[in-house]
DNA sequence: CTGTTAGCGCATTCAA
DNA sequence: TTGAATGCGCTAACAG
């Protein structure tokens, strides 16, 4: 392996001069500069990162700890974060916690061991004592997508309440009263905030407050399907289903199809988080879209601010509603709804569509 | 920051003894062992990775360079790779080349600079001179999903020819003669192998060899849509469309919907690579499924073998066909096909369904 | 502007 | 089994 010593020798300068040219950027004569650069190129010199890190007490590596890189929301976030990090001169160490507190703690240790300069975390909902340990050690941290209780870490998260408000307006606009809610885990801030916003305000929008219409999963598709099946199993026959994230919606759609067959086409769908294929199903899935890229990009930017001693502020990223529903359906939902008390859902009675 | 020196002092032993206990695993008395361990725990000592790397000439970090982490195939692969790597005591450095040769080269340099122990690469199709430089430097490499010309790196890739054969059998079983092929870039091995296997054998399966039915994109959804539009723009009215990967199929479906409207429902769909939602569209998308997790896991296993001086062998991972089509459709494709010469597609004439 | 030198934290060698 | 000493490759402080 070629070291900076080899480069210096070949360029006929001292080790110190070579170092200054190669990384110091400091005062060096044009002559030695060009000779060092030439020597480095000829020898195909690549600096030894760990050695440099040891000396400089920084690594130019950032960590990204997400709960599941397979979740399209997080893979989009990761893509944007990696891109932004690279733009700012950092590389990214990736890890999946799989929503497990112990695993999260172990990975945090691995990050700490690598002496990364800071990290982005989408925290799981459980025990965060390991996190506190790290922060005690002074490692810069920015939370993304989710907040963590009892931490002042800057957080870039979706505007969950605002997004839910858009969904509620849309539901009212379409005349839905019997709406099933397939929520996420209450231990995770996105799960709790979306559920609370929805439950506390659905009555204002003319939506039934029957608790049997509400169930939750763990933000994995299978659990969304199970939650939907439980709702149907209680005899509920909603005219619309609201999924608390893309994967919960995916699961709900699968369960609807499996349980109701063709009648599933009579159930309108709306999701918090948008997925690639939501326009392609029948009926299509409308969605509140929060740009995961933006969260990833802003997260890295905030983290780098933090690392450089600048202030980093928490932000809520606003959402946009994507209305994929056509005109209100002429055909009423085909199944007799046990809990339904009235109708309010004909083209004539349809209020103004939301923006 | 607490160093091993602090631990040694607290345990009342020398630095060397502490080191032996903490990582050497070598001969130490039970007494000093327990005291060192206790001191380390009390001080919350976490070894300095870069310093250790500098001394040991290894980092316990593996690189993973994919073309796009947002592609579900690669995010599944990455998830499995990260998991397997962690199981084997490694952490994973992630990077996206975005299918760009220059970016791939830059990231390879970044990997080399970090002195990672080896890396998994899903190579882009273009210039691979940077790669050769690295391999000259002796860095262990395993290719995943795609092969790279002129390299003997072990490769874990799908059995593209075998997968295409399954698709061809299915197409024949459904009686399709006019089949559009939305291929991937010929510069990438998966694009070339799938296309070659399909083009060279489609005639045997009774499929039209009209070149106007074939077009290609770059494995991003938008390019798949554009390719599909070009095929339709040439007046082709296929009864089935075969997409060379999940995202090409996604693009093709979008273009079919946009261009043909309801008539798009008359076109059957089949994809190389399976996506979450393929069962939910109308008609559903059948697919050849190659398990990306398996590729990721085997890739890491092969890489670790290589690092440890064991032999690593290339493998082709077999695919399974997922037939989501119902009984053959009663309604013929609704548009008059300019190039069609005969029919072969009524329920009566339908040959045996494939397995 | 440049050469020399001292360590960053750790694993490992060599003596004891 | 253990302590002391060495150096991995590099940057930064210092002296010239």
Image: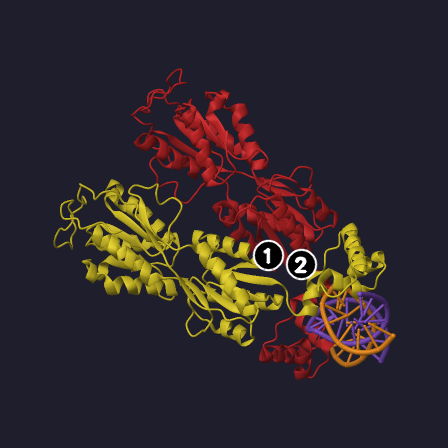
Chain colours: A red, B yellow, C orange, D purple
Q: Number of callouts in the render? A: 2
State the image coordinates of residue A302 (x, y, percent, origin top left): 63, 48
Which image quadrant is residue B119 in?
bottom right
Which chain hosts label 2?
A: A
Under tag 2, what secondary structure? Answer: helix
Q: Earlier in the sequence, mark 2 or mark 1?
A: 1
In this view, B152 is above or below B9: below
Q: CA distance from mark 2 to mark 1?
A: 10 Å
At horizontal 13% and vertical 51% (from top left) the residue drawn is: B343
Q: Residues within 10 Å of mark 1 (few under 14, many from 20)?
A: many
The image quadrant of residue A145 is top right
Is any atom of residue A87 visible in this view? no
Residues marked 2 and 1 touching at CB (< 8 Å):
yes
Please name the residue shown 24% across and 57% down the image.
Answer: B213
Residue at the left extreme of this rendering: B342
Left or right? Give the position of A287 relative to B178. right
Residues tagged by mark 2 and mark 1 found on one chain of the structure: yes
Disc 2 crowd, CA 10 A, few/some/many (<14, 14-19, 20+): many
At horizontal 52% and vertical 45% (from top left) the residue drawn is A292
Q: Is residue C2 left or right of residue B327?
A: right
Instruction: Please name whichever residue, A195 or C13, is drawn nearer the observer in this view of the structure.
Output: C13
The image quadrant where one finds the N terminus of chain A is bottom right
Q: Disc 1 sits on a residue from what chain?
A: A
- Where is mark 2, residue-wise? A114
Residue sitting nearer the eye, A215 or A62: A215
| Mark 1, secondary structure of its residue | strand
Disc 1 designates what residue?
A: A93
Image spot of residue B21 (x, y percent): 75, 61
Point out residue A268 in the picture as x, y percentages from the top left corner.
38, 31
């Amino acid at each position: 392996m070629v070291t900076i010593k080899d480069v210096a020798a070949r360029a006929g300068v001292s080790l110190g001069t070579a170092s200054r040219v190669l990384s110091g950027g400091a005062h060096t004569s044009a002559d030695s500069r060009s000779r060092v650069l030439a020597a480095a190129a000829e020898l195909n010199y690549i600096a030894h990162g760990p050695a440099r890190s040891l000396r400089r007490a920084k690594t130019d590596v950032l960590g990204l700890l997400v709960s599941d890189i397979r979740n399209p929301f997080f893979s989009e976030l990761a893509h944007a974060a990696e891109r932004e990090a690279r733009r700012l001169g950092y590389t990214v160490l990736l890890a999946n916690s799989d929503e497990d507190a112990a695993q999260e703690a172990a990975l945090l240790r691995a990050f700490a061991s690598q002496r990364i300069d800071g990290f982005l975390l989408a925290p799981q909902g459980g025990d965060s004592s390991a996190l506190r340990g790290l922060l005690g050690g002074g490692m810069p941290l920015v939370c993304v997508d989710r907040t963590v209780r009892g931490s002042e870490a800057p957080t870039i998260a979706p505007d969950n309440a605002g997004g839910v408000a858009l969904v509620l307006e849309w539901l009212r606009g379409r005349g839905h009263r019997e709406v099933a809610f397939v929520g996420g885990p209450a231990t995770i801030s996105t799960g709790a905030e979306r559920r609370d916003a929805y439950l506390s305000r659905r009555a204002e929008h003319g939506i039934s407050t029957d608790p049997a219409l509400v169930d939750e999963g763990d933000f994995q598709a299978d659990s969304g399907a199970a939650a939907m099946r439980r709702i149907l199993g209680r005899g509920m026959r909603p005219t619309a289903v609201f999924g608390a994230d893309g994967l919960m919606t995916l699961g709900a759609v699968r369960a609807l199809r499996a349980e109701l067959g063709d009648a599933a086409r009579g159930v309108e769908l709306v999701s918090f988080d948008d997925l690639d294929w939501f326009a392609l199903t029948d009926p299509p899935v409308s969605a509140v879209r929060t740009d995961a890229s933006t969260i990833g990009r802003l997260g890295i930017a905030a983290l780098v601010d933090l690392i450089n001693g600048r202030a980093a502020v928490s932000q809520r990223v606003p959402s946009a509603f994507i209305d994929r529903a056509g005109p209100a359906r002429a055909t009423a939902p085909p199944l007799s709804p046990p809990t339904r008390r009235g109708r309010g859902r004909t083209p004539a009675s349809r209020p103004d569509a939301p923006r």
